[in-house]
C-alpha cells in the first residue's frame, strides 16, 4: 500500500513531474516583481505622495481584497446563511489522526476532547512520530496501549476501544500522516494536531458536512488561537485572535468563489479515497496541508470530478499559537516558505482557464501575495526614510493615506467580528472593543512582524531549507490549567 501511495503522488504531483509553464503564469509572476521595482524606484525621483507609490499599491491591493471579501461574505448576515446548517444525510464513518512528536504535555488534552465528542469517531490513531519524551509511557500507563513496535499499529485501548497507537521512526508530520492514512479504515479522516482542543460538536459537524455533500473532499474547521498567559502571550493572542477571524471570513468568501485553497491541518477533514487517489501528504513540502489542497484541486479539474473544498462554521477548536516573537517568526517563516514552494510547484495553474476561477482569480492573487510583504516592508522603510530626511511634503500626505487605510481596516475588523459571530455562534473569544484597538495598532506592530516572518520565509525558500525548527507549545496547557482552577 505504501508503494501505491507513492505511485499516486508521482502521477499527480507537479513537483515530481513539472508541467510546462504557460506564458500567462510567467507574465503574472514577473509582472508583480517588475511592478514593485518600478514603484520602489519612483521614491528616489518623485515628490509628493506619488513618491510613496509602493505603499499606495499595497494599500490599494489590500483594500480591493477587503472589499471582495466583504461582498462575498455578506450572505452571513442572513439567518440561514451558513450552508452547513441545513439538511441531513447518512453520516460516513469518521477516523481521527493525531500526528504527535514529543507532545506528551498536551496530548491528554487533545484526547480528552476527542473522547468527549457528541459523535465519537470510529477510530483515533496516534501517529507517534518517533517521540523521545514521555509519549510512550503516557500511552501505555494512562491509556493502556501496548507498545506495538516500530512501524506497527497497536491493539485497541482497553479503556477506549477506538484508540490505537501507531509507532513510527521520526520522519516528519507528513510521513506520519501518510502512515496513519494507510492504517485507518474509515471513509473520512480528520487530522488534528496534538496541541488542538476540539469543541464537543466538532466531529459531528465534520461528519455531517461530508454526509450531505458527496463532492466534498476537504473541509476546514474554525480555529481560535491560544497563547501562554504571559505579557508576550497575551499580546500575540490578542492580534492573532482577530487575524484568525479575518482569515476565516476570507476563506468563506473564497469558498463562495469556488477558489478555497487554504485549510489548516491542525483541524481538517478529508475524504480518504480522494486523498489516497492523489498520493497523500507530500513530505517535501513545509506546509503539507496547503499543498495537498492544490493537488486535490488540480486532479479534480483535470479529471472533471467537480470536487469541493469548504470551511465549516459549526466545526470549531482551539489551538496552541506562538506567544513569543521568536516562535511567531519561526512559524510565519515556515508558513511563507511553504507557500512559496507550493506557488512555484503549481505555477502552471496561475492564469490557466482550465482551472476556472481558481486559475483566473485566486492564483493570480496568490502571485501578488508572494511579494506583498516586500511591498509592505519597503513602504514602511521608505516612510521612515522620508521622515528622517525631513521630506514632510511627502510624509504628511502619506500619513493621510495611512489614516484612511486604518479607517477601512477598522470597519472591516468590526464587520468581520460581526459576521464571524453570526456564522460560528462563538461570542466568547472576540470583543468589538479589542478588535477596534487591534485595527489601530496592528499596522505599526503585528503587521510588521508578520511581514518580517514572511521575508524570512523568502530567505528560507531561496536557500532551499526544509527544517521547521522546534516550537514550544504552552498556551493550551496553561489555558486548561486556568479553566480547571476556576471550576474548583
Image (cartoon, grey):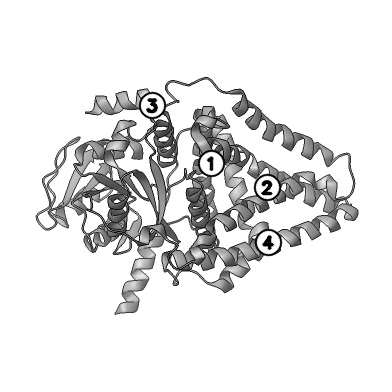
Which residue of the protein is positioned furthest toward the left in this rendering? Answer: 158
Q: Which of pointers 3 and 1 lies earlier in the amino acid sequence?
A: 3
Disc 1 + disc 4, Cβ < 8 Å? no
Query: Which residue corresponds to the image point at 43% horizontal and 47% vertical from the top-left?
Result: 263
Label 1 residue SS: helix
Give the distance between the C-alpha atoms of the residues marked 4 and 3, in whole angstroms. 42 Å
Q: Is residue 269 visible?
A: yes
Label 4 residue SS: helix
The residue under label 3 is 12
Q: Residue 291, relative to residue 7: is it above or below? A: below
Q: Is residue 464 visible?
A: no
The residue under label 2 is 61
| Quadrant position of the N terminus in the picture | top left
State which mark lies toward you, 2 or 1: 2
- Of residues 248 and 86, the one nearer the viewer is 86
- Of residues 194 and 270, the one nearer the viewer is 270
Number of residues whose C-alpha sits closer than 10 Å to that of mark 4, classed few (under 14), some (14–19) or many (20 or more): some
The residue under label 1 is 336
The residue under label 4 is 408
Q: Which of pointers 2 and 3 lies earlier in the amino acid sequence?
A: 3
Answer with left or right where residue 119 lies relative to residue 369.
left
State which mark lies toward you, 1 or 4: 4
Label 2 residue SS: helix
Q: How many marks do you count on the picture? A: 4
Q: Which of pointers 2 and 1 lies earlier in the amino acid sequence?
A: 2
Label 3 residue SS: helix
- Of residues 402 and 19, the one nearer the viewer is 19
Amino acid at each position: 500500500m505504501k508503494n501505491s501511495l507513492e505511485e499516486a503522488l508521482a502521477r499527480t504531483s507537479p513537483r515530481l513531474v513539472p508541467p510546462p509553464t504557460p506564458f500567462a503564469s510567467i507574465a503574472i509572476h514577473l509582472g508583480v516583481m517588475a511592478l514593485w521595482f518600478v514603484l520602489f524606484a519612483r521614491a528616489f525621483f518623485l515628490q509628493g505622495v506619488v513618491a510613496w507609490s509602493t505603499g499606495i499599491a499595497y494599500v490599494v491591493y489590500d483594500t480591493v481584497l477587503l472589499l471582495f471579501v466583504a461582498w462575498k461574505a455578506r450572505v452571513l448576515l442572513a439567518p440561514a446563511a451558513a450552508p452547513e446548517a441545513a439538511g441531513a444525510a447518512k453520516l460516513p464513518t469518521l477516523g481521527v489522526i493525531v500526528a504527535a512528536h514529543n507532545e506528551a504535555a498536551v496530548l491528554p488534552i487533545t484526547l480528552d476532547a476527542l473522547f468527549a465528542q457528541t459523535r465519537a469517531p470510529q477510530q483515533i490513531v496516534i501517529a507517534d512520530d518517533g517521540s523521545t519524551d514521555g509519549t510512550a509511557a503516557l500511552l501505555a500507563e494512562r491509556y493502556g496501549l501496548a507498545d506495538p513496535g516500530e512501524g506497527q499499529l497497536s491493539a485497541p485501548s482497553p479503556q477506549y476501544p477506538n484508540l490505537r497507537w501507531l509507532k513510527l521512526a521520526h520522519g516528519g508530520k507528513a510521513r506520519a500522516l501518510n502512515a496513519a492514512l494507510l492504517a485507518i479504515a474509515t471513509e473520512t479522516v480528520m487530522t488534528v494536531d496534538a496541541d488542538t482542543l476540539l469543541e464537543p460538536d466538532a466531529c459531528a459537524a465534520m461528519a455531517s458536512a461530508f454526509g450531505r455533500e458527496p463532492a466534498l473532499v476537504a473541509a476546514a474547521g474554525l480555529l481560535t488561537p491560544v497563547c501562554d498567559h504571559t505579557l508576550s502571550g497575551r499580546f500575540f493572542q490578542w492580534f492573532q485572535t482577530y487575524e484568525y477571524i479575518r482569515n476565516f471570513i476570507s476563506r468563506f468568501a473564497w469558498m463562495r468563489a469556488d477558489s478555497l485553497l487554504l485549510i489548516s491541518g491542525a483541524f481538517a477533514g478529508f475524504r480518504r479515497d480522494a486523498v489516497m487517489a492523489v498520493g497523500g501528504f507530500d513530505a517535501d513540502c513545509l506546509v503539507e496541508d496547503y499543498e495537498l489542497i492544490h493537488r486535490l484541486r488540480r486532479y479534480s479539474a483535470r479529471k472533471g470530478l467537480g470536487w469541493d473544498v469548504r470551511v465549516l462554521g459549526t466545526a470549531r477548536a482551539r489551538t496552541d499559537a506562538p506567544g513569543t516573537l521568536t516562535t511567531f517568526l519561526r512559524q510565519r517563516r515556515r508558513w511563507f516558505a511553504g507557500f512559496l514552494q507550493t506557488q512555484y510547484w503549481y505555477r502552471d495553474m496561475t492564469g490557466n482557464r482550465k482551472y476556472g476561477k481558481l486559475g483566473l482569480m485566486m492564483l493570480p492573487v496568490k502571485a501578488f501575495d508572494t511579494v506583498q510583504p516586500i511591498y509592505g516592508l519597503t513602504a514602511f522603510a521608505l516612510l521612515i526614510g522620508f521622515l528622517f530626511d525631513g521630506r514632510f511634503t511627502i510624509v504628511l500626505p502619506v500619513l493621510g493615506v495611512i489614516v484612511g487605510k486604518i479607517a477601512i481596516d477598522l470597519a472591516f475588523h468590526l464587520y468581520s467580528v460581526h459576521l464571524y459571530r453570526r456564522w460560528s455562534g462563538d461570542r466568547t473569544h472576540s470583543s468589538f472593543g479589542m478588535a477596534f484597538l487591534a485595527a489601530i495598532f496592528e499596522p505599526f506592530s503585528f503587521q510588521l512582524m508578520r511581514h518580517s516572518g514572511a521575508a524570512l520565509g523568502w530567505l528560507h525558500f531561496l536557500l532551499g531549507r526544509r527544517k521547521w525548527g522546534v516550537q514550544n507549545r504552552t498556551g493550551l496547557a496553561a489555558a486548561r490549567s486556568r479553566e480547571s482552577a476556576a471550576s474548583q
